[in-house]
């Protein structure tokens, strides 16, 4: 009888915090920039330079800890993790091993079997390393220290996940919590959220863990899913052949759909951790904790409950809109101006999602502002423009956030409400299309659709289709 295996997965999630400056110096954290232009003696590890903790890093770390049900360590400190690598200018990384800022938390995820708590072992603050650029043309490696010293939190889960689906649900939940807090944009493609997957397999019913491997280089949910499936199958094949799984760090190649060994997995003693002598310990007062608690925003779960009672919109709309903090903010701000939640929801669920998909954009990159979306909705309601013109205007708003009122004026797109001009055009269309008129009189209802189209064309789209339809029926 074939053996059945169970996958055991824990994650180490690195999140770049949304501070303007680095964790221990005043250099910019802006993404991009000329190589080595966002640097100073501190973040390039110059001898004698002294780090100073950025207070906002501590505030963000505590906020994430509170939102993920963690205990906040009231007395914590930084440690040096010693290792040599070219992207690590000091030959050590400032991190937290002994007293991390947050411990023993959890987030709840939805699974086909119902809700499940995924434990969070700890969250610690640390600095990011630089970036190596491998130049294949010149056959050399260059280093950019712009990222060195960018503040990170590392969220270490318990090995509570059993499938790629649970991993993605956990990451989605974490990403939304952190985005709602404003602590990070969590853009995987820019590296502001990165996940390392620790994975082992064991026979179903076993209680001891198998030998785990760690997989790096995972920068999309698609890559994470493929890597989990690939590594699970690789380990099962080894066990089926009677071979042992080696504890090691592996690199996932999403193009080839395979992983390869990078190095044997290190233990904490390999890094010779010791308390950082240049940074004072942190004592967190009750007042400080209360000030962070008081600033915690409404998170997605609470928002979904409120939307259900406050706005009369479908559950599916609520799920999509609250799935992005930026979209939820835009929805609420627009409704506050125009007071029409269903109309605002329709624009977000319809044209906005279509354009996001077409242009392969994230909802957080929507440029449309609430006053402009509210103005567009009001123009349609007042029949100043028709639906097709509104969609045309919205495409321009989506690209540049133009003022729709000014744009409609400048382009002469206002609906023609002159009944005399409209009647004259409809009469001309009827006269020019005797066959369609005959078809309509012979019971072919669809014929009127053609006549409406011809009228709209003659009016250059600047008529109200409902008025055209009514007038045609009257004259026919």
Image: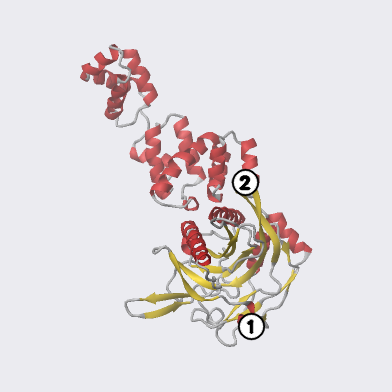
Q: Indicate the quadrant containing the N terminus: top left, top right, bottom left or bottom right.
A: bottom right
Q: Residues within 10 Å of mark 1 (few under 14, many from 20)?
A: few
User: Residue placed farthest to the right in the image?
Assistant: 286
Nearer the camera: disc 1 or disc 2: 2
Q: Residue at x 50, y 71 (%)?
A: 250
Q: Are marks 1 and 2 in contact (CB under 8 Å)?
A: no
Which residue does the image show at 58% across and 75% down from the upper left?
A: 25
Q: Nearer the viewer, residue 244 or 476?
A: 244
Residue 187 position (above or below residue 112): below
The answer to whether residue 465 shows anywhere in this view is yes
Q: Nearer the viewer, residue 17 or 198?
A: 198
Which class describes the residues within 10 Å of circle 2: few (<14), some (14-19), or many (20+)? few
Q: Dividing the image into 4 quarters, which one contains the C terminus?
A: top left
**Residue 113: numbered disc:** 2
Extreme residue in the front direction: 1
Q: Would residue 440 appear left or right of 300 to someone viewing this image?
A: left
**Residue pictured at 39% horizontal, 23% vertical:** 466
Between 252 and 126, the one lying in front of the other is: 252
């Amino acid at each position: 009888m074939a053996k059945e295996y169970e996958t055991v997965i824990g994650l180490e999630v690195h999140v770049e915090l949304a501070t303007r400056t680095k964790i221990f110096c005043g250099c910019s954290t802006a993404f991009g920039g000329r190589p080595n232009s966002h640097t100073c003696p501190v973040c390039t590890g110059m001898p004698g330079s002294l780090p100073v903790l950025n207070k906002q890093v501590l505030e963000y770390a505590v906020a994430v800890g509170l939102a993920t049900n963690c205990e906040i360590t009231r007395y914590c400190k930084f440690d040096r993790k010693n290792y040599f690598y070219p992207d690590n200018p000091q030959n050590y990384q400032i991190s937290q091993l002994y007293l991390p800022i947050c411990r023993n938390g959890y987030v709840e995820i939805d699974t086909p079997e119902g809700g499940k708590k995924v434990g969070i072992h700890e969250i610690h603050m640390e600095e990011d390393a630089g970036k190596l650029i491998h130049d294949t043309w010149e056959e050399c490696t260059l280093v950019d220290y712009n990222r060195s010293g960018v503040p990170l939190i590392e969220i270490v889960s318990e090995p509570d996940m059993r499938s790629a689906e649970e991993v993605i649900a956990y990451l989605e939940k974490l990403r939304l919590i952190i985005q709602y807090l404003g602590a990070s944009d969590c853009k995987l493609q820019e590296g502001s959220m990165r996940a390392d997957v620790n994975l082992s397999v064991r026979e179903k019913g076993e209680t001891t863990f198998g030998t785990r491997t760690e997989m790096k280089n995972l920068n999309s949910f698609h890559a994470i899913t493929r890597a989990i499936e690939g590594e699970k199958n690789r380990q099962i094949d080894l066990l089926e052949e009677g071979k042992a799984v080696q504890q090691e760090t592996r690199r996932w190649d999403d193009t080839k759909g395979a992983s390869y060994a990078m190095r044997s997995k290190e233990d904490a003693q390999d890094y010779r951790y010791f308390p950082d002598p240049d940074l004072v310990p942190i004592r967190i007062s009750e007042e400080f904790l209360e000030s962070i608690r008081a600033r915690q925003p409404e998170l997605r779960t609470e928002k979904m409950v409120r939307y259900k009672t406050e706005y009369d919109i479908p559950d599916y709309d609520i799920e999509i809109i609250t799935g992005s903090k930026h979209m939820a903010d835009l929805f609420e701000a627009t409704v506050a101006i125009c007071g029409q939640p269903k109309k605002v929801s329709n624009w977000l669920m319809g044209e906005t999602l279509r354009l996001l998909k077409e242009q392969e954009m994230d909802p957080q990159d929507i440029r449309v502002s609430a006053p402009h979306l509210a103005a567009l909705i009001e123009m349609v309601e007042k029949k100043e423009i028709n639906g097709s013109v509104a969609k045309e205007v919205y495409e321009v708003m989506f690209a540049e956030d133009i003022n729709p009122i000014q744009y409609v004026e400048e382009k002469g797109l206002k609906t023609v409400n002159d009944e005399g001009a409209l009647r004259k055009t409809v009469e001309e269309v009827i006269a020019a299309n005797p066959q369609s008129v005959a078809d309509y009189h012979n019971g072919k209802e669809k014929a009127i659709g053609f006549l409406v189209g011809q009228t709209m064309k003659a009016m250059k789209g600047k008529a109200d289709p409902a008025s055209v339809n009514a007038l045609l029926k009257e004259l026919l």
